[in-house]
Image (spheres, rainbow, N blue to C red):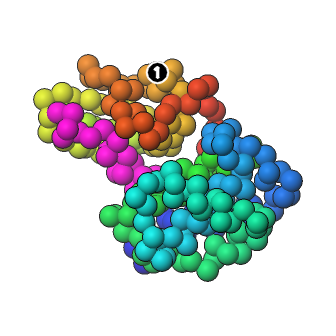
Amino acid sequence: MNEYGTAWNASRDRVSDLILRTELSKLDAIAPLTPEWRVRDIVAHLVGVAQDVSSGNFPQDFDAWTRAQVERLRTFDAHELIDQWQEFPIGEMLSESLAIALYDQVTHEADICHALGVPIALEPRTLSLLSKFTLSRFAAQENDLCVTLHLDDQDFVSGDGARALTLSATAFDWFRASNGRRSVTQIKAMEWWGDVDVIAILFASGFFTPAHDDVFEIFR
């Protein structure tokens, strides 16, 4: 199994352990970073992704795809969903071309930890894989950018455009900012260099939006 699958499996194991040792009543709470979903709905989405990827059901409309996952698994409680999750070992299918599956998985792992008020722990190699994927958020070629991310002890570069944009941050903070889990104020306060409207570029597609309020998480 390659490193993407290994990282996905590790995330699934961490989420499974956390959910199974949490009372079901607490898992019915709304997750603040996904306010349309309860914690158990996030779990349903993650299980649904594994089911769909295993069967080759990839989305034409991502929102409709995720809604269908949550709806078809609505009758199961969160602990039962964890049992089902083990039946779909999609880690064996993942590679760089499906890095978005790892990105989505770990994004929601962190959302669950935030909702339950527990620390999140990610391996450096997982953060490195996620950091590489986040370069796609800049659409460097389309935006005539040369992007350099200084994250922890690594550099990630994309594009050779005329406009230089550089960020220095922790890999975890940037990962969470890249998918809208930080506010506009927090994102602008990061160490950016370059005459570029970062918010406009990161959220141009409308798929992600910045958090309404500042977000604080426990990372270890």
Residue 101, given in percent of the width and then of the height, sits at 46, 61
Q: Which residues are magenta?
A: 125-144
In front: 28, or 166?
Answer: 28
Q: Is residue 128 magenta?
A: yes
Q: Quadrant of residue 35?
A: top right
| Quadrant of the drawing holding the N terminus | bottom left
- Can the viewer see residue 182 in this picture? yes
Would you say 56 lies left or right of 123 here? Answer: left
Report the magenta stretch's main SS: helix
Compared with residue 180, is residue 65 higher up or lower down, i.e. above or below? below
In front: 186, or 66?
Answer: 66
Q: Residue at x 61, y 66 (%)?
A: 47
Residue 61, given in percent of the width and then of the height, sits at 44, 54
Q: Residue at x 46, y 54 (%)?
A: 62
Q: Amino acid at mark 1?
A: Ala
Would you say 132 lies left or right of 118 here? Answer: left
Would you say 205 lies left or right of 78 here? Answer: left
Would you say 32 lies left or right of 92 here? Answer: right
Label 1 secondary element: loop
Compared with residue 120, is residue 85 higher up or lower down, i.e. above or below? below
Q: Residue at x 31, y 46 (%)?
A: 136
In front: 212, or 11?
Answer: 212
